[in-house]
Amino acid sequence: ATPTAITCALSRLNRLGILVKNSQALETLPELTHIIFDKTGTLTEGRFSIVNIQRFQPVSSRQITDNELLNVVANLEQHSEHPIARAFVSHLKQNLAISQVTISIGQGISGIWQDQQLRVGSAEFCQINNPEQIGAANANVFVTIDQQLVAAFTLADNLRPHALTLIRNLQQQGYRLGMLTGDSSGQAAELAADLNLDFMQQGCSPADKVAAITALVNDGHKVLMLGDGINDSPGFNAAHISVAVDSGTDLSKNQADVVLLKPDISLLAFLLAAGKQASGIIR
Ligand code: ADP
Ligand code: MG
């Protein structure tokens, strides 16, 4: 293959909005068997709105109103860049002092507010063992104050336009499709069922995502991971080829082999087609 032919193929992809940063990774494309999707910000838009608040009364504390609680959570979430945080921050009314803010990637955020330990995040992060038992099966964000459950929030975001079309197209081509997500609410299972994915693992820490991808790789499969680049670097490194979709955050920060320069995951199909065509050219 001539360097000119490679340059040609890459610039054709570039015109479509596909930036190939590591052309060696393309060598895997013709043998690709598995495509793994991150959920939030990848299959979905990552623009959340609060659709339900369920309150719980902790023993030994005054009931704070929903608006007060939202303000407290918003003050903590200002420190996070997670898409979920943005939905809370729009409810900020008044600045409060919160100290010792700690972010746990893909899990949640904590801090000290009025000498109390405030935690906002997934059921695992807030140590809620059975969200179903407390009637919060679809809740994806929990709030605890000094280890006591105060609220369960349901935040929803939308499937990206073209997600369903892309998935159907990839299924027809025979790829095995899976989703790995840190979300452990009923919403993750619902989405995986709607899309008819071959497998889904929920409640994943970034390390769990790496383990799931590594297991496929060790079984001899060729794996592509598609993410939005937020918290995805470990998974990207474990896959044979990584693709990041533009989700409005700084794309230069992520380590993906390929970057989709538009918020349009259906571009992935063009990459796969180009990889098959160009397999003779690239090696
Ligand atoms: P995904 O794997 O689908 O991209 P993430 O790993 O980004 O999702 O997040 C997984 C879960 O962690 C969320 O569903 C939420 O429960 C929790 N979480 C992460 N960051 C935050 C945050 N800043 N505020 C509240 N919850 C959070
Ligand atoms: Mg994500």
Image (cartoon, grey):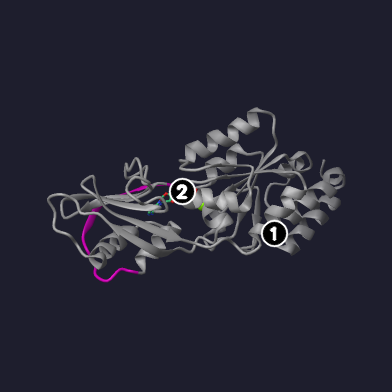
Q: Residue at x 64, y 58 (%)?
A: 163
Answer yes or no: disc 2 within 8 Å of ligand 1: yes
Which residue position holds label 1?
A: 165
Residue 95 x, y percent position in the rendering: 24, 67
SS at circle 1: helix
Residue nearer the viewer, 154 or 106:
154
Q: Vertical placement of 159 versus 24: above or below?
A: below
SS at circle 2: loop
Answer yes or no: disc 1 within 8 Å of ligand 2: no
Q: Identify the magenta region.
A: 91-106
Q: Residues within 10 Å of mark 1 (few under 14, many from 20)?
A: few
Per the model, the C-alpha gap separating discs 1 and 2 is 23 Å
Magenta stretch contains residue 46: no
Amino acid on which disc 2 is placed? Asp
Which residue position holds label 2?
A: 183
Residue 67 x, y percent position in the rendering: 26, 68
Residue 190 x, y percent position in the rendering: 53, 52
Question: Does residue 193 appear to the left or right of 53 in the view shown?
Answer: right
Q: Quadrant of the C terminus?
A: top right
Decide if residue 230 is in sight here. Answer: no
Residue nearer the viewer, 45 or 98:
45
Amino acid on which disc 1 is placed? Thr
